Amino acid sequence: MGSCWSQIRERPHDEGSTAEAFVRELLGLPEVIRVAAIIGIGHPDETKTPVSADELDYHKVRHNRYAEAFER
């Protein structure tokens, strides 16, 4: 099995609608529920080569608080 994270928050669906509004309507979610992301799960169509740990942007990762950068 494989998975894929997709950002929904602040993404357009079409000219007149956001991806969040589309998902909220599709799933029948009330306005008080916010949709940040969706994780698709299934059988992958292809195998991707992972990015090596040396190439990851660790400066973007925070630990517990925003000011505490992740140390490798």
Image (tube, grey):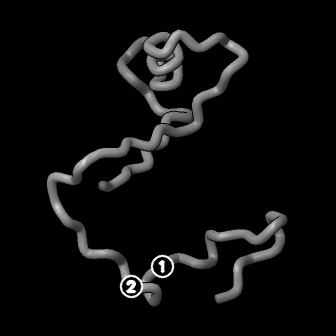
Whether residue 15 appears in this view of the structure is yes
**Residue at position x 72%, y 16% in the image:** 32
Residue under circle 2? Answer: 52
Query: Dot 2, how many residues are within 10 Å of its Cα: few (below 14), some (14-19), or many (20+)?
Result: few
**Residue at position x 45%, y 25% in the image:** 19
Please provide percent x and percent y for residue 60: 62, 70
* Kind of residue at disc 1: Leu
Q: Quadrant of the C terminus?
A: bottom right
Q: Secondary structure at mark 2?
A: loop
* In this view, 70 is above or below 33: below
* Kind of residue at disc 2: Ser
Q: Quadrant of the N terminus?
A: bottom left
7 horizontally vs 49: left or right: right
Please provide percent x and percent y for residue 16: 42, 12
**Residue at position x 58%, y 29% in the image:** 35
Q: Quadrant of residue 47?
A: bottom left
Query: Dot 1, how many residues are within 10 Å of its Cα: few (below 14), some (14-19), or many (20+)?
Result: few
Please provide percent x and percent y for residue 53: 46, 85
Circles 2 and 1: CB atoms closer than 8 Å: yes
Q: Which mark is residue 25?
A: none
**Residue at position x 74%, y 77% in the image:** 69
Whether residue 17 appears in this view of the structure is no
Residue under circle 1? Answer: 56
* In this view, 45 is above or below 65: above
Q: Secondary structure at mark 1?
A: loop
Please provide percent x and percent y for residue 5: 44, 49
